[in-house]
Amino acid sequence: MNEDAVIHIVDDDRAVREGLGFMLSSLGLGIQTHGSAMDLLDRLDDAVIGCILADVRMPGMTGLELLDELNRRGCALPVIIITAHADVPMAVRAIQSGALDFFEKPVNGMALVERINEALKTARASAGDAQKKAQIAERIASLTSREMDVARAVMDGRQNKQIAADLGISPKTVEIHRHNLMAKMEATTTADLVRQLVTADWPQD
């Protein structure tokens, strides 16, 4: 299930990078190693499902600073912090900044692999949700202004005759707009239409 996933290992210690890479690649996981946070940021394609394993104490940008930068860029890939110099405040800071977990070196391999698998499930679910939202957004963008008026009215629970009165058009015209709306949104039922619009957080305030 992980053939298309990439695990990014960010650590300035080459031996650590190679050791983690060997362990994880033997499980069929795609691996990219990075000697610094900047190297990761320069090469990262966050459209690819994956997970980031980052050391804390690195020259230049630290692991915690990397977390902040990933957040600033809107990167949704799960991040697991790994360090030989752990302390409670550091762990709290990492989790508050969005880290999925915090491991001390030497790392318990089985525990790390289990957490990575959980991270990949989370990443896949997030990617699926984002793709679904993007598809719905494309459908909404194809609607005419009148079809959007009808969509808003449907969201408000209005019937065709009520929509016609609200918009000053005939019920037959409402039926036509509603038919086109359903076709463009690829909705088979009114409930399906509403579900899509809710998923897309539409209409926006």
Image: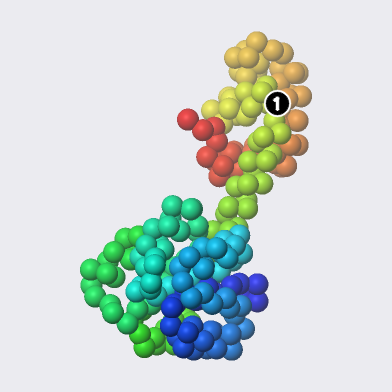
Task: Look at 39% across and 58% down and name the residue there.
Answer: 68
Query: Is 190 situated left or right of 64 in this image?
Result: right
Instruction: Give coordinates of residue 106: x percent, y percent.
Output: 36, 88
**Residue closest to the eye, 34 or 115:** 34
- As drawn, which residue projects farthest toward the top? 168
**Can you tell which quarter of the image residue 46 is in?**
bottom right
**Can you tell which quarter of the image residue 93 is in?**
bottom left
Query: Is 205 situated left or right of 142 in this image?
Result: left
Instruction: Give coordinates of residue 40: x percent, y percent.
Output: 51, 67
Residue 111, visible in the rendered structure: yes
- As drawn, which residue projects farthest toward the front? 60
Q: Is 78 above or below relative to 181?
A: below
Task: Look at 32% across and 60% down and name the residue there.
Answer: 96
Q: Is 145 above or below relative to 112?
A: above
Task: Look at 76% across and 24% down and name the residue there.
Answer: 176
Q: Residues within 10 Å of mark 1 (few under 14, many from 20)?
A: few
Residue 110, visible in the rendered structure: no
**Residue closest to the eye, 142 or 82:** 82
Report helix, strand or loop for mark 1. loop
Which corner quadrant holds the N terminus? bottom right
Residue tagged 1: 144
Query: Is 181 situated left or right of 87 in this image?
Result: right
Query: Is 112 situated left or right of 140 in this image?
Result: left
Instruction: Give coordinates of residue 26: x percent, y percent.
Output: 59, 89
Q: Is 188 above or below relative to 126?
A: above
**Residue closest to the eye, 139 or 168:** 139
**Can you tell which quarter of the image residue 160 is in?**
top right
Q: Amino acid at mark 1?
A: Thr
Q: Is 98 above or below relative to 192?
A: below
Instruction: Give coordinates of residue 128: x percent, y percent.
Output: 60, 58
**Residue closest to the eye, 61 or 130:** 61
Task: Look at 59% across and 14% down and name the residue there.
Answer: 166
